[in-house]
Amino acid sequence: MSVIHSPCPKCGSNNNVAIYEDGHEYCFTPGCNYFKSATGIMPTPTPSTPNEIEPVIGDYVEIKSRKIPADSNKFFGYIKGKHGNETAYFWPIYDDQRRLVGYKIRKKNKQFLMHGSNPDNRFLGQEKWGDGGKLLVIFEGEYDCLSYHAVRKNWPCVSLPNGVESGQKVIKSQLPWLLKFEQVILCYDTDEHGQSAVQRDIQLLPPRKGKVGNLESYKDANEALLAGDTKAIMNMVWNAKEYEPDGIINASKLLTEVLEDPKESSAEYPYQFLNDKLHGLRKSELCTITAGTGIGKSTFVNEIAYDLLVRQNQTVGVISLEENLRRTARRFIGIDLNYPIHIDRGNITDEQIEKAFEKTLGTGRLWLYDHFGSLDCDVLLNRIRYCIVSLGCDWVIFDHLSILVSGSDESNEVKAIDRTMTKLRSLVEETGAGLLLVSHLRRPQGGKGYEDGQQTSLSSLRGSSSIGCLSDICIGLERDQQDSSGAGTVVRVLKNRFSGWTGVAGSVKYNEKTGRMVTLDDTPSFVESGHVFIESDF
């Protein structure tokens, strides 16, 4: 049957209307439903199957601006035609039964449209390569696929139908077909968006089957073709690398880490009995200190912070949610002076305070967080990350978890604690800094409370088992607040992931005159300060 072509009276195309010998007319422009029978205009005939569409009329031409030859376009059925009044290119889409079900339309300025559908989530060009083979290359865009074909005409290649956004969906749908190839190379654009997607999609393929192809010095295969660098396209295949997922490391590469002295990455507690039992403080660890109300958790952790800052020359970040910046600043000055200046000045002179300031706050290695009453969890976690990554903090003191959770929007406290602890654990692993976390205990059953000297345990941590599970070290402080015998505060190691030792490590005592928490019966620790306190004061 002979056919002539004419303009479409409905969509305005120049030659997409086919006029047949029997007099009926049909417009092949995607989206145009123009049909005319010998007796008049009628609706478009229903295809033989629900998804099948009529083919587009057009020509196979060289795309000169992209150096893509006409024979590559013809091989894939990539047609130059009309979409309305505009020139466009049409890439056919076939379903699993090889029926024409859609077109991907490319217009000027990278405008992409879809005519028909892609019900089986197939690759562009998939129908050309049968069932498997030695090697298949998947490209992000159709021009890159055509460019590769121009260089390696007999080697299977396909394109994602809708860029990297469609990669995961199409690869999952066509995985049985992909597994019929010995190797599958994903060659997405080398920009950040493309490389992020390739790391996501390559994980869908079995180990040793999927590889990642990179075009050195070029964004994509078509850019290499335009530069005349066909060797780069070939090397993209030969130099493709097997996917190595993050975190999976061959143990044979760990000799340097094994030879490294573990003490080199450690700091010290100001209490020797803890150094004896815990072998010091280590970065990349989360240490939780817990106790009943009023036992001295904040005083204890700030003694550690002061020692890290002044004696060990570490950079420290302190987040105290229960006190303002002035109180925290005076706490560090008071530790250095061996006098609680937050209560009164006593005989302390301005000169002494200024000298203590230079040793502590004035070093530039102490960073404090002014929370302005805001207790948003994500905001606070970002501040901790900033302290570590941008300000170089080796250690962060976070006092305390319970007040952060109580100020959150979540109604379920256990869920809120789990969420926060997981993020804190990840943050420690990500940044490599050490985190000292203060947490409260749940109210005990029975008559005796933790303020009366009841023994602490991991099960008594408030709200959730995640605090104990995700911490590397857990330390409990125990003291009977009404005991006047001078027994001090017991320091109990509840968890010790590093060496495994747990139990009572020693005791400390708070001195009201100095505002310090020191090892019980350890008065010489203040001799270095040079102040007027004598042993009888303790």
Image: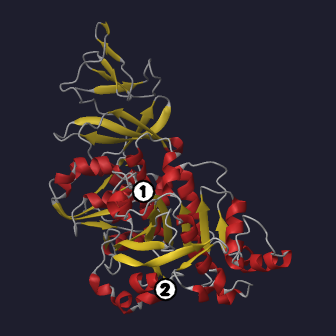
Mark closest to the chain's N terminus, 2 or 1: 2
**Picture quadrant where residue 323 is located:** bottom right
Residue 237 to residue 103: above or below:
below
Q: Residue at x 33, y 76 (%)?
A: 502
Q: How many marks?
A: 2
Q: Which image quarter holds the N terminus? A: top left
**Is residue 124 shown to the viewer in this render?**
no
Res 457 label:
none
Does residue 273 appear left or right of residue 37 in this picture? right
**Picture quadrant where residue 336 is located:** bottom right
Along the viewing direction, whichever of 466 and 69 lies nearer the viewer: 466
Does residue 418 appear left or right of residue 206 in this picture? right
Along the viewing direction, whichever of 380 and 481 lies nearer the viewer: 481
Does the CB distance between marks 2 and 1 fall below 8 Å?
Answer: no
Residue carrying label 1: 441
Does residue 241 appear left or right of residue 376 in this picture? left
Does residue 313 appear left or right of residue 472 in this picture? right
**Is residue 88 shown to the viewer in this render?**
yes
Along the viewing direction, whichever of 354 and 503 lies nearer the viewer: 503
Q: Residue at x 72, y 78 (%)?
A: 337
Check disc 1 and give the amino acid type: Leu
Residue 117 screen position, x and y as percent: 30, 34
Residue 52 screen position, x and y as percent: 23, 30
Residue lying at the far right of the rendered structure: 350
Indicate the secondary structure of the residue bearing disc 1: loop
Check disc 2 and give the amino acid type: Gln
Residue 305 to residue 164: above or below:
below
Residue carrying label 2: 272
